[in-house]
Image: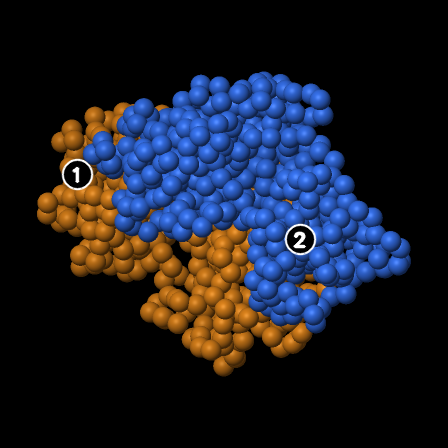
Chain colours: A blue, B orange
Amino acid sequence: MVGAGFGGLEVVRGLKRADVDTVLVDRHNYHLFTPLLYQVASSLLDPSEIARPARTMLRRIANVDVRVGSVTRVDLDTQQVQTENGPLEYDYLVLASGSINNFFGNDQLSQAAFGLKDLGQALALRNQVLWQFERASWSGDPQERRRLLTFVIVGGGPTGVEYAGALSELVALVLRKDFPYLDMAEVRVVLVELTDGLLAGFAPRLSKAAVRTLRRKGIELMLGVAAKDYTGGVLRLSNGQDLAVDTIVWTAGVRAAPLDPGLGALSVRQDRLRVQPTLQLDGHPQVFVVGDLAGMVQDGQPLPMMIPAAQQEGRHVAKNIKRLIRQEPLLPFRYRDPGMMATIGRNSGVAQVGPFRFSGFIGWVIWLGFHLLKVVSFRNRLVILIAWAVDYLFYDRPVRLITGPSPPPGRGL
Amino acid sequence: MVGAGFGGLEVVRGLKRADVDTVLVDRHNYHLFTPLLYQVASSLLDPSEIARPARTMLRRIANVDVRVGSVTRVDLDTQQVQTENGPLEYDYLVLASGSINNFFGNDQLSQAAFGLKDLGQALALRNQVLWQFERASWSGDPQERRRLLTFVIVGGGPTGVEYAGALSELVALVLRKDFPYLDMAEVRVVLVELTDGLLAGFAPRLSKAAVRTLRRKGIELMLGVAAKDYTGGVLRLSNGQDLAVDTIVWTAGVRAAPLDPGLGALSVRQDRLRVQPTLQLDGHPQVFVVGDLAGMVQDGQPLPMMIPAAQQEGRHVAKNIKRLIRQEPLLPFRYRDPGMMATIGRNSGVAQVGPFRFSGFIGWVIWLGFHLLKVVSFRNRLVILIAWAVDYLFYDRPVRLITGPSPPPGRGL
């Protein structure tokens, strides 16, 4: 079992009472509640509030052994997974390594841009934003300050929209008080999106609500625009505009996390692995694939790289492994769309569940309640509730600490 | 004003209504509540619970400008402080840069050992301890596991004692549940102290109570023993013993944090700067020194490098600067000892206040209450209380996340 994400955990839980010994390997020692990652990046939550040690989460499951280590090779012929810490043998293998940022081959951007896919990236982005304000407070040059205080978000999906809203509120409500000597009118938050609207996949009415809300927050929306390249501190856009900017946040695409280049031959779109309807890897019936890594196609469409798909697939794979052991025929997987939601800062959110569409304050309340319930432990629920309440009532965010090293000089200063 | 520690903040606050413009420079953007740092290192608290942005703390003080940057040079002749981000000019200067680890010239130990003086060090130590358990869970070699799971703390002052207690409880109460496949009898926590007792400066009765409590927790105490050198993964002790160990925690000494080698000529013991009884730097009446950096001597004894001394000196310096502006004679500083306390794990602490001595459960309750009151904000008080309650009632620590990069291979694995 490779990967302690939403899919991997469901597999382990589904095999709890089966006559198997499960070994769960992950690069990290924690499971990450990714929907709130943007709140870590915008100084609202601490890492430990959205991440929980995998060992603790699975403590009550007797037949699982958790191991931390990076997978370096998957040897399908000898049935071994190689890790940096040693090999693991398997009878059945489940691959659920998730996804990483996709820069579509743009090396300059992949080196310069900040991602929002894991804790390390979220903390790096948080530090960067706070550093830019600290640097601006030293600068007497308006043009330099303008560059320091320009933040470009590429990608208008849920992550981009949520982070843009959270960042603009961090600036307008919190940092404004921290930096009385800075003119907040010099701050620019720009959201660049390739298509003509935000939140593709949501109902058109909700996409339009997101556009209105972000505009009202002072975010510059550039729709139908692509980020082309980034050289010498200048981001070139497809509409001919050049932006002098240090801080680019990339939320414009993901691809499956590669585990082993040898598996590349089996991949379809976005490096996802080709699977049978039973979620078995093509040509390898004892190997299953779950979540973003699984190139599952339903009704001619690839399944979305989203948490509900990973969880449903994880539960299904646990069932199919038990059937395989009992030598029963495996069942094909079918995805049921549970709906989706996004928040766009205080008092504003969008949600669609079945035939229902919510936006504005009601969408926001639904979002809050749903995420608070889904968060991984009681303690976290309580602490997150406190953080949200302090933010909402006092316009204050507790974790504005620059904890990392200062970024390399030359960029920014 | 250099340094946003306990001394520096008191100076800024003391000058709040004076006719001065204060600029506060610090390497970090936060003030750190250092007495709870060992709880970050032992997976109990998150950084944001014991650190608070200096800008937020000083938001209501109109005459202070907070700047983040490292001081590279102090030019006493031209009255300038050079920082990595540019120069600052001053009429009056207060130096309060605190202290750093003192390895007494032992280069091997200074490179290999983990410190407990700032947030970065505390997080590095937390990651290291958790990594060693992860590595041990991969190892089939008992001797290797023994080395991985040996932790040596050098120094039996409050920091060493408090961390040793917290580490042994992390192992015995929390990690035991996380690693059911590991034998916790293979874990060794060793505390090495040069003198014959723990907690020098405390009443003998309290020092003895600390010894008893640590022994009861299974910590190996080596009193009257020095750490001599560390080569090839082996720590050599002055009693002839060799310990195979990856993780050495250094709490055996501090020295003043050097700001500028040019100031070295003015330093006394432990790199502290020679000051007048008014806390003015020798020969530079417009420069004041506060806290661990101030080589203040009272009744023939150097003042302790502790928070109360820094705070009292900070308040005194603010008063003296106001007198200097009004051209009144400056007052000499006199330290009043408010007592001290330390905790040694759950249900056990020592405290001495004036003629009173407390140990055991009462000492622990006094310690808890005092630190909770002193912590920097209401939100932090609440969140820390929750963390302590969860730890006390459920034997669980919320922040066992390995957030940093994996330490370099070759050490440990």
Looking at the rendered structure, the secondary structure element under dot 2 is loop
- Extreme residue in the left direction: B77
Image height check: is A134 above or below A81? above
Identify residue type, mark 1.
Answer: Tyr
Please state the horizontal and vertical placement of residue B349, each as a whole percent of the image: 58, 50
**Chain holding disc 1:** B
- Nearer to us in this view, B182 or A163: A163
Q: Is residue A276 left or right of residue A411?
A: right
Query: Which of A132 and B314 lies nearest the eye of the viewer?
Result: A132
> Residue drawn at (53%, 57%), measured in percent from left and top?
B127
Q: Position of residue B108 (x, y in %)?
A: 39, 72
Q: What secondary structure is found at the residue carrying circle 1?
A: loop
The structure residue drawn at horizontal position 33% and vertical position 58%, both measured from the top left corner, is B255
Q: Which residue is mark 2?
A: A274
Quarter location, residue A370: top right
Number of marks in the image? Answer: 2
| Marks 2/1: CA–CA distance | 67 Å
Horizontal relation, residue A339 to residue B302: left or right: right
Q: Quadrant of the C terminus of chain B?
A: bottom right
Name which quarter of the figure residue A259 lies in: bottom right
How many neighbours does mark 1 have within 10 angstroms: few (below 14), some (14-19), or many (20 or more)? Answer: some
Tag of residue B90:
1
Residue type beneath disc 2: Arg
**Which chain is indicated by disc 2?**
A
- Residue A181 horizontal/vertical position (percent): 28, 28
Coordinates of residue A326 in the picture (x, y in percent): 89, 58
- Give the camera-side residue of A295 and A2: A295
Residue farthest to the front?
Answer: A300
